Image (cartoon, helix red, strand yellow):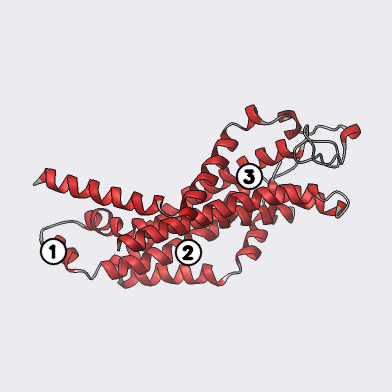
Amino acid sequence: MALDGANKDLSASYMMWYRFSRNPAAVIGTLIVLSAVIFAILAPYITPKPEDVGAVVNFRARHLPPDATHWFGTDKVGRDIFSRAVFGLRISLLLVIGVLGISVPIGTVLGLAAGYFGGWTERIITGLTNVMLAMPPLVMALAVSNLLQPTLMNAMIAITLLWWTWHARLIYAVSKSVASEDFIEAARIAGAGPMHILFREILPNCVSVISVKTTLDAAFVILFGATLSFLGFGVKPPTPDLGSMVADGRQFMPDFWWEVLCPGAVILYVTLGFNLLGDGLRDMFDMEG
């Protein structure tokens, strides 16, 4: 019987992977995300001018257009934009890992607790979530960032204070529905404790929505972080950040267009990858259901 169950699980996993692999957009999104991660990890070894990440000045090479030596051209002080964009991509992905690595578990646990326990637990958690959601995200992030120094850690804190709320609301809706199912009542009758029911019975039913939401949120976190940096509340110069690179280059538009277009294209590239991957996961789980 155990072997039959294992075979069923393996067959179901294979069918999910088959559906995913037959979705061209999902495959393209996966390749884009993987390539972005590889570029970010290997940034010191694959960029032609890794020293340009710092406060390097080379006025003889300033505002050079894209060519075989400088694929994305150079900026106002002669730094290689491609090298800085790749390191900026690394910053963006670190921001995604930090923000979602904190906000997703917090939102998941709070959403599970509100949906399962109900009563005053539900009222407190949903009330706090609604209050946070009522605040304009960018305004609150700017306020927090304005009180703190413009560093990656502080940008992460500013975004995390907002991001857990969407996950809490989503998981609350799912867990509230699952908590009324018969198998949950059967688990209670069998003597299962609240922690077992929350994390062994309800949580597995939330995995699909958590996976899709987290993947799609990665793109929003990158855009949100780039926006903070563009407005001057993100990563502190001379550390390269895609948003601040666009902000620095806009004053030289349209003559030196590559200083805005190239880092902007990197933002578009990685956010498109996460969106395509998230859509593919959603289609896969929908077909499974």
Q: Residue furthest right?
A: 60
Give the amino acid type for the residue marked by disc 1 in the picture: Ala
Count the marks: 3
Give the amino acid type for the residue marked by disc 2 in the picture: Trp
Q: Is residue 147 visible?
A: no
Q: Nearer the viewer, residue 166 or 283?
A: 283
Which part of the image, by quadrant, shows the C terminus? Answer: bottom left
Q: CA distance from mark 2 to mark 1?
A: 30 Å
Q: How many neighbours does mark 3 have within 10 angstroms: few (below 14), some (14-19), or many (20 or more)? A: many
Read off the residue under disc 3.
152
Q: Nearer the viewer, residue 52 or 119?
A: 52
* Rendered residue at 75%/38% (across/down): 71
Residue 215 % position (x, y): 48, 54
Tell me which numbered mark, 3 or 1, is placed earlier along the sequence. Answer: 3
Q: Secondary structure at mark 1?
A: helix
* Res. 166 mark: 2
Q: Secondary structure at mark 3?
A: helix
Up-down relation of residue 55 to residue 161 (above or below): above
Residue 4 % position (x, y): 13, 47
Which quadrant of the structure image shows residue 127?
bottom left
Q: CA distance from mark 3 to mark 2?
A: 22 Å
Read off the residue under disc 1.
186
Give the amino acid type for the residue marked by disc 3 in the picture: Leu
Tell me which numbered mark, 2 or 1, is placed earlier along the sequence. Answer: 2
* Rendered residue at 41%/56% (across/down): 281
